Amino acid sequence: MIKYIAILALLFVLELCYFKIAVWFNIVDKPNQRSSHARIVLRGGGIIFTIALWVWSIWSGFPYPWMLAGVTLAAGISFVDDIHSLPDLPRLISQILAVAMVLVDVGFGMPEGWLLAPFAWLVCVSVVNFYNFMDGINGITGGYSVAVLLPLLYLNQSLYFVAEGYLEVCLIAVLVFCFFNFRTKAKCFAGDVGAVSIALILLFAVWRLIVATGDITYLMFFAVYAADAMLTIAHRIMLKENLGEAHRKHAYQLMANELKIPHVVVSCIYMVAQLIISFALILTEWHWVVFVGAALILIVVYLIFMKKYYHLHEEYLASLKKQ
């Protein structure tokens, strides 16, 4: 316990130190027409997730060197992108390499893991990008990450699929970030560095759980993000939009922008929804029933929500054209 308290204090101080650096180098997020915030906020506060991973790795004797290298690579490129926007290709290459390195320490570097590796790689790259897409309002990245971590911590008590302290230190880092972000007026945003790194850190734990149990349904720990991101992509394809352009069509964005629901309330909705799905999965033996049932419910809820409220976003877009 004393170690965890010391790590909490260290990460808190390091986050404050980063804020000083961000102010000095003007690493900020300026609002635009596609943003869900209206004031300049420090960007890159999610760098604390990678720092925490290094702190835990040093403390634990570097048990997962490939995973650490992969997260560090992706976080480094993403941090540069937070400061000066990079072309898509370097970011995509870094994600591909980072995911490959993370999966080596999951166990997919062994011959028996090669058959599942392409599927795992595709899932990881997708979830990393989902995390990036969904990082748009105060509290959502931190709150949702807590919702993923809690069931993992619960299961690790009996299954021991990841080394001691890994999930605990990750949760501490997320809570430190939430202290500055999960509020009405955020002190910082996660930035690409935060969204990408926490996604990889969580994916590593989830895939270790899947390998330990042979149960692929644990991917439902990312169900709410996946539903919003994938259905929004499908919606934009139907609208014949350029998927590379910024937008405000996610369900959470409509809730925060058009419906004026406070950011922290929207983030709590996503957090609670994911916790319900995850613990419904954990607390029953009917995993595939929960998997299919939750997926169908999320799809139906998304479609009903968009049918009822998407016209508000169309009205917003029309108002922009008149300006």
Image: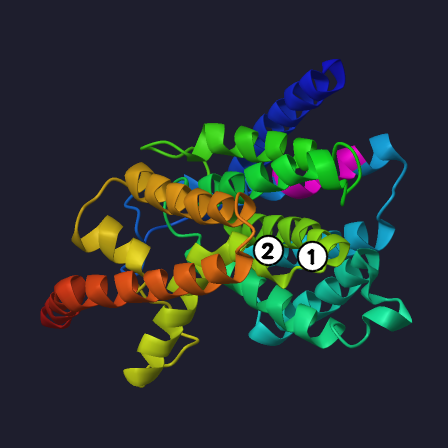
* Mark number, residue 147: none
In the picture of the structure, the residue carrying the numbered disc 2 is 218
Residue at image coords 72%, 16%: 1
Horizontal and vertical percent position of residue 179:
47, 27
Nearer-the-camera pick, 183 or 282: 282
Q: Secondary structure beneath disc 1?
A: helix
Residue at image coords 52%, 50%: 281
Q: Amino acid at mark 2?
A: Tyr
In screen coordinates, is 181 left or right of 52?
Answer: left
Q: Is residue 51 magenta?
A: yes
Q: Is residue 307 above or below residue 190?
A: below
Main SS of the magenta part reads helix
In screen coordinates, is 219 left or right of 121?
Answer: left
Horizontal and vertical percent position of residue 61:
90, 36
Using a 10 Å C-alpha cutoff, classify the residue at mark 2 as few (fewer than 14 neighbours), some (14 to 19) or many (20 or more): many
**Label located before the other in sequence (2 or 1):** 1
Q: Amino acid at mark 1?
A: Ile
Q: Secondary structure beneath disc 2?
A: helix
Residue at image coords 82%, 74%: 114
Q: What is the span of residues highlighted in magenta in the rendered image?
A: 48-56
The quadrant in which residue 77 appears is: bottom right
In the picture of the structure, the residue carrying the numbered disc 1 is 210
The quadrant in which residue 89 appears is: bottom right
Using a 10 Å C-alpha cutoff, classify the residue at mark 1 as few (fewer than 14 neighbours), some (14 to 19) or many (20 or more): some
Q: Say whether residue 52 is visible.
A: no
* CB within 8 Å, label 2 to label 1: yes
Horizontal and vertical percent position of residue 33:
27, 60
In screen coordinates, is 62 left or right of 190?
Answer: right
Nearer-the-camera pick, 31 or 269: 269
Nearer-the-camera pick, 179 or 107: 107
Judged from this view, the residue extending furthest toward the front is 285
